[in-house]
Every structure is written in structure tokens, then in C-alpha cells.
């Protein structure tokens, strides 16, 4: 069946990774998956949290948030509410876990990198765009540390694989790659897949939103996700080489 934006079932939305978007952080990327736009910044701090001091290991973590009018209706700032929502916590932890999968924390040394992923405009796939963009910001932050000779190991040992993420789902019985919002809300099955540039999985989050799904459907979605992640890995490398 035709998709709302005319894409093929196995086609990503247009992807853009604009490095050095912000002048202050050690790494920054504005990532766009179609109309979804996320600003990812990487901030370096010398030292590690108290519970990790003296271990010789670094630390990488993430925080995720949405601007009040990132969606079609305004949402209150969580800082005003005085409480961080469960969805925000969940996505922040997902991004942190995903990025730690590509880092050798011993080679990083006792340095901390915080990845802030702020959704400027949401049209589905904000968490997957955030992970894909945050990886590029993280590489730039590690390069900054290497230039300062602040790493415990060589920079190519610190970031030892690439990380990408993409959404997949089943709409009207058809597996589709990289769901925009109108597809996401109509999906019978919704899945977010985090993978490495070598085609290994970091995390798979799949839910039958309206019923259940079969093993062959899951395999089809995972195949689509790996196809998309391969293209995203190429986009990341192109951005880093520019």
C-alpha cells in the first residue's frame, strides 16, 4: 500500500546530520529524520561520578527532552511540572545504554560525557534520531579529548563501533521502515531497533499495539531495521568525514 509520503516500504525518510550546529559543546549535531529534528550535544567533564572514582573507567550518560511545542499541541515543560515523566526517563536511559555499547570506558579514562538530546520538532522516531545523532556528537567529543591528550587510550579504541537506531512497524499488514507520526499512531506493531555498524543488535523494543505479531513478521521488521541502520551508518561516516 502507498505510504502517506510516497516512500517505498523499505525507504528511510531524508536523513541529515549537521555537525557543529552549536558552538559551545565539545560535540553537537542537528539530526533530521524527515520532519523530526533533534539537537544532540556532547559535553565533556573531567572526572567521573563519585561512585566511579578511582576505577580508571569513564562514564557516558544521556538526557532527553522535548521542547513545549515540538508536537502539534503544546506540552508543559517538565521543569515547570517539577517532575520528570516516565517516558522521558525511559528514553534517556535507552540513549545512554545505546551509546555505552560503542565506548571502551577504560580507554576513555576518568572523563564523563553527557549527551543531551533535545527534540525541536517531532514527527515520529525521536528516540531513534536522537541515538543516531548522539553517536556523531560523541565521536566529536572523544576527538576533542584526544586533541587535549586527555584519553587513557587511543581514540580509535575509545569508540570501537558505530551505533544507529531506526523504527519499524506493521501498518495494514505491511512491514515498513522509519515510521512518521501518522504511521506510528496507526501501527499494529511498533518496534525500535538499535544496532551496530556491523549488523549486531544493541536493543530491540517491539510491541503489538493492536493484537499480536508472528515470528515471520518480526524477522521481516528486523531485516528492514538492519537495512535502514546500514544506510544510517553510511550517513554518519559521511558526516564525520566532512
Image (cartoon, helix red, strand yellow):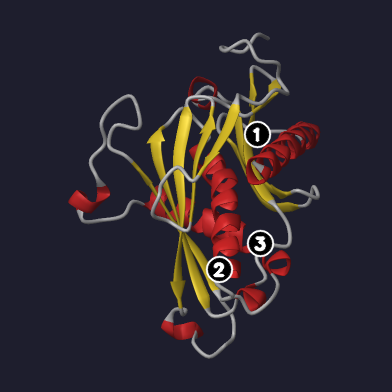
Q: CA distance from mark 3 to mark 2?
A: 19 Å
How many numbered tags mark residues here? 3
Q: Nearer the viewer, residue 155 or 77?
A: 155
Q: Tag 2 or tag 3, which sits nearer the N-term?
A: 3
Determine crowd level at label 2: few under 14, some 14-19, many 20+ residues with C-alpha closer than 10 A.
some
Mark 1 or 3, nearer chain start? 3
Q: Which residue is mark 3?
A: 101
Residue 27 at x, y = what percent?
50, 54
Q: Quadrant of residue 171?
A: top right
Confirm whether residue 109 shows in the render: yes
Does residue 193 show up?
A: no
> Taking 50 as reference, is 223 left or right?
right
Q: Residue furthest left?
A: 80
Residue at the spot of label 2: 145
Q: In front here: 129 or 153? A: 153
Q: Position of residue 42 (x, y in %)?
A: 47, 57
Q: Can you identify the residue that label 1 sits on?
A: 212
Mark 3 neighbour density, 10 Å: few (under 14) some (14–19) many (20 or more)? some
Q: CA distance from mark 2 to mark 1?
A: 47 Å
The C terminus, quarter of image: top right
Name the residue nearer the viewer: 43 or 215: 43
Q: Residue at x 58, y 27 (%)?
A: 179
Which residue: 67% across, 71% down?
104
Viewer-side label of 3, 2: 2
Quarter of image, res 97: bottom right
Left or right: residue 224 compared with residue 120? right
Discs 3, 2 touching: Cβ within 8 Å: no
Q: Is residue 120 above or below residue 104?
A: above
Q: Verify CB contact (< 8 Å) between mark 2 and mark 1.
A: no
Amino acid at each position: 500500500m502507498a505510504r502517506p509520503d510516497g516512500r517505498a516500504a523499505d525507504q528511510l525518510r531524508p536523513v541529515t546530520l549537521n555537525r557543529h550546529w552549536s558552538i559551545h559543546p565539545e560535540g553537537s549535531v542537528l539530526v533530521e529524520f524527515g520532519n523530526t529534528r533533534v539537537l544532540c550535544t556532547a559535553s565533556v567533564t573531567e572526572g567521573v561520578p563519585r561512585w566511579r572514582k578511582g576505577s580508571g573507567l569513564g562514564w557516558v550518560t544521556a538526557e532527553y527532552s522535548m521542547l513545549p511545542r515540538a508536537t502539534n499541541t503544546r506540552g508543559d515543560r517538565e521543569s515547570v511540572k517539577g517532575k520528570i515523566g516516565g517516558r522521558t526517563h525511559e528514553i534517556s536511559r535507552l540513549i545512554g545504554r545505546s551509546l555505552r555499547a560503542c565506548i571502551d570506558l577504560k580507554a576513555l579514562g576518568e572523563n564523563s560525557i553527557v549527551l543531551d538530546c533535545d527534540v525541536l520538532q517531532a514527527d515520529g522516531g525521536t528516540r531513534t534520531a536522537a541515538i543516531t545523532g548522539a553517536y556523531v556528537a560523541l565521536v566529536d567529543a572523544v576527538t576533542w579529548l584526544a586533541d587535549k591528550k586527555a584519553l587513557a587510550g587511543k581514540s580509535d579504541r575509545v569508540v570501537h563501533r558505530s551505533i544507529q537506531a531506526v523504527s519499524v512497524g506493521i501498518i495494514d499488514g505491511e512491514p515498513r521502515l522509519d515510521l512518521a507520526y501518522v504511521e506510528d499512531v496507526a501501527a499494529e506493531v511498533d518496534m525500535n531497533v538499535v544496532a551496530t555498524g556491523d549488523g549486531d543488535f544493541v536493543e530491540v523494543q517491539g510491541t503489538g499495539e493492536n493484537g499480536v505479531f508472528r515470528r515471520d513478521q518480526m524477522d521481516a521488521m528486523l531485516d528492514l531495521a538492519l537495512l535502514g541502520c546500514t544506510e544510517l551508518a553510511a550517513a554518519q561516516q559521511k558526516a564525520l568525514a566532512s
